Image (tube, coloured by chain):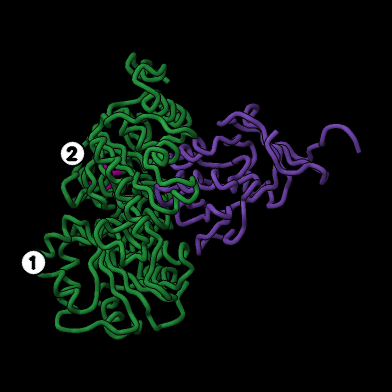
């Protein structure tokens, strides 16, 4: 790999052991991917708040020890300076204020506050959401970023035209510290061209439709870049968020094109870079029905214990829809309903009275985490339901529960009645 | 029987992480998710739709077409490494950023670009000698060679 004099100085330790470890990690990682050099990045998102899951394995809640071990892959703690790149904390293990809902012990909550403070001291914006692009961290077109969180990666690559690979905890932390990232993969034009054509022959209109379509596309194309071709494909930003998250869960989609909507290609031909597609797949009514069955494959019992809305974290209009559906009603005594939204949007929802409406119905509005990332469910949950293909994909595997997938309305109805009726 | 173990099959490819290790293969016929796909406390595949769900790579050789899913891939294998459930070597088909970072963190011998598709040529339970420096995967005969990095 070609290194700059500044890279070389970092490598020999002139900027201290943390910077040295970070640049060593980036060089090894870049070499494995075939990068010829590193480039500057000033827009990094990572996940470095550590909860009990990590503290137990390491045997300490010391934030410096946890960061060095899990973020820098170092056996011994090192002094970590202020981060060079503009850095943002993604979704984490706990709701900063309502952690008691998760069943977290006060001592563990304090330890996570310390882990968060360690990041704040180093200049990190602690937005604590999987959707920083909803709350002020909005990369520019063409900007080189280093982001974790597969649903955010596919969103900023595809919808905003920013450039990032799917980073992990260790590589994004290394980029925060050094302001560098390997110049390879989705940073380059070549990887961003579509190779797989999706011929859409059934209406994709509702948010439920876009979740299902995304889940099917990911399963079909795996790590290819698809171009979506069909009539009247006009998703809202919520639908784009759900589509990408689903495609990145069933498969490995980090970039897609929807001509007329996404910014890098105005036509299918342009998305393909003037070349024929390597593969074409047809999405029709049968494919949609099979995807519903696949997403609900773990579910048999219709008595629903828990309904989760907001994966990726809900937009304000999704919170408003839940409030409208539960207004002046009560959810079932046997069911919990939790809505997840970025803390910045929760404050706004509070201002607008939406939180009060939802809480009056017996439900909760939570932030900063989710059941999959935080690995928590209401006690005794055996059957859960969600409006998110991504959450329906992950939670049964992580928690060993049954999962139903449906629209927000179907899910909220299940919370009100305690029964899955779809 | 004395002397070096004999190989009944040798696959040649490109070594991407140096070193040599032997272990029993877990051959995954579909890409593996890290976060939400494995349990790092046991080394078992947990993704509900995965063909090898319930099978373990702990202390063995993880043979896989590639890494997919959440960006927490390396983080989960990092936890596996610290809990002693990590694979001792990795043999794979397709590189991506998740797998590359996972290999950096695991730091075990790894080989790719083999002359024969490892997913069909290798079988779960095969005793493999993975040489990440030479870029070879040898399927050993005989039962006397246990798991472990040499």
Q: Please report, as a chain letter, where disc 2 is located.
A: A
Residue identifier under label 2: A140
What mark, if any, has residue A352 been given in the picture? 1
Quadrant housing residue A141: top left
- Left or right side of B49 for A356: left
Colour in which the image shows chain A: green
Position of residue A52 measured from the top left corner of the image (x, y, whole percent): 42, 53
The residue nearer to you, when weighing A242 against A180, is A180
Quarter placement of the N terminus of chain B: top right
Colour in which the image shows chain B: purple
The secondary structure that dominates the magenta segment is: helix
Position of residue A22 measured from the top left corner of the image (x, y, whole percent): 39, 29
Q: Is residue A127 above or below residue A356?
A: above
Magenta range: A266-271
Q: Is any atom of residue B111 visible in this view?
A: no
- Left or right side of A16 for B61: right
């Amino acid at each position: 790999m070609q290194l700059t004099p500044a890279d070389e100085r970092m490598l020999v330790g002139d900027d201290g052991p943390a910077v040295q470890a970070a640049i060593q990690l980036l060089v090894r990682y870049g070499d494995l991917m075939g990068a010829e050099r590193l480039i500057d990045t000033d827009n990094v998102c990572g996940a470095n708040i550590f909860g009990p899951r990590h503290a137990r394995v390491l045997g300490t809640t010391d934030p410096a020890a946890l960061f060095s071990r899990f973020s820098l892959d170092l056996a011994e703690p090192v002094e970590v300076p202020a981060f060079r790149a503009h850095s943002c904390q993604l979704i984490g293990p706990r709701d900063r204020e309502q952690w008691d809902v998760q069943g977290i012990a006060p001592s563990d909550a304090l330890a996570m506050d310390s882990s968060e403070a360690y990041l704040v001291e180093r200049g990190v914006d602690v937005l604590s959401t999987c959707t920083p692009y909803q709350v002020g961290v909005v990369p520019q077109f063409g900007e080189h970023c280093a982001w974790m969180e597969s649903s955010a990666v596919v969103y900023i690559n595809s919808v905003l035209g920013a450039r990032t690979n799917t980073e992990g905890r260790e590589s994004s932390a290394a980029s925060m510290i050094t302001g560098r990232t390997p110049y390879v993969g989705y940073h380059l034009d070549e990887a961003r061209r579509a190779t797989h054509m999706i011929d859409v022959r059934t209406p994709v209109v509702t948010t439920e439709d876009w979740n299902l379509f995304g889940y099917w596309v990911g399963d079909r194309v795996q790590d290819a870049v698809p171009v979506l071709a069909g009539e009247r494909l006009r998703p809202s930003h919520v639908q784009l968020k759900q589509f990408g998250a689903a495609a990145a869960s069933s498969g490995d989609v980090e970039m897609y094109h929807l001509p007329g909507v996404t910014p890098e290609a105005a036509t299918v031909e342009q998305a393909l870079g003037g070349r024929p597609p390597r593969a074409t797949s047809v999405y029709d009514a049968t494919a949609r029905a099979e995807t519903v069955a696949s997403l609900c494959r773990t579910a048999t019992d219709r008595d629903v214990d828990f309904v989760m809305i907001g994966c990726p974290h809900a937009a304000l209009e999704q919170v408003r829809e839940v409030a409208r559906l539960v207004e002046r009603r009560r959810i079932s005594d046997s069911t919990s309903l939790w809505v997840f939204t970025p803390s910045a949007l929760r404050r706004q929802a509070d201002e607008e009275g939406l939180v009060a409406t939802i809480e009056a119905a017996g439900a909760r509005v939570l932030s900063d985490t989710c059941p999959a990332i935080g690995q928590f469910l209401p006690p005794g949950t055996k059957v859960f339901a969600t409006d998110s293909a991504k959450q329906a994909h992950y939670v049964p595997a992580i928690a060993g529960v049954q999962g139903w997938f449906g629209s927000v309305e179907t899910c909220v109805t299940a919370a009100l009645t305690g029964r899955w009726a779809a | 029987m004395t002397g070096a173990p004999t190989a009944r099959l040798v696959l040649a490819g490109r070594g991407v992480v140096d070193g040599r290790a032997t272990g029993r293969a877990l051959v995954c016929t579909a890409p593996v998710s890290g976060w939400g796909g494995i349990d790092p406390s046991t080394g078992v595949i947990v993704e509900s739709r995965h063909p090898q769900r319930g099978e373990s790579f702990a202390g063995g050789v993880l043979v896989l077409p590639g890494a997919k899913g959440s960006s927490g891939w390396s983080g989960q294998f990092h936890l596996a490494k610290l809990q002693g459930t990590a694979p001792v070597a990795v043999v794979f088909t397709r590189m991506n950023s998740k797998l590359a970072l996972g290999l950096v963190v695991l730091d075990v011998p790894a080989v790719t670009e083999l002359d024969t598709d490892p997913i069909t040529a290798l079988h779960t339970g095969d005793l493999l000698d993975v040489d990440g420096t030479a870029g070879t995967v040898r399927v050993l005969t005989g039962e006397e060679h246990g798991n472990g990095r040499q």
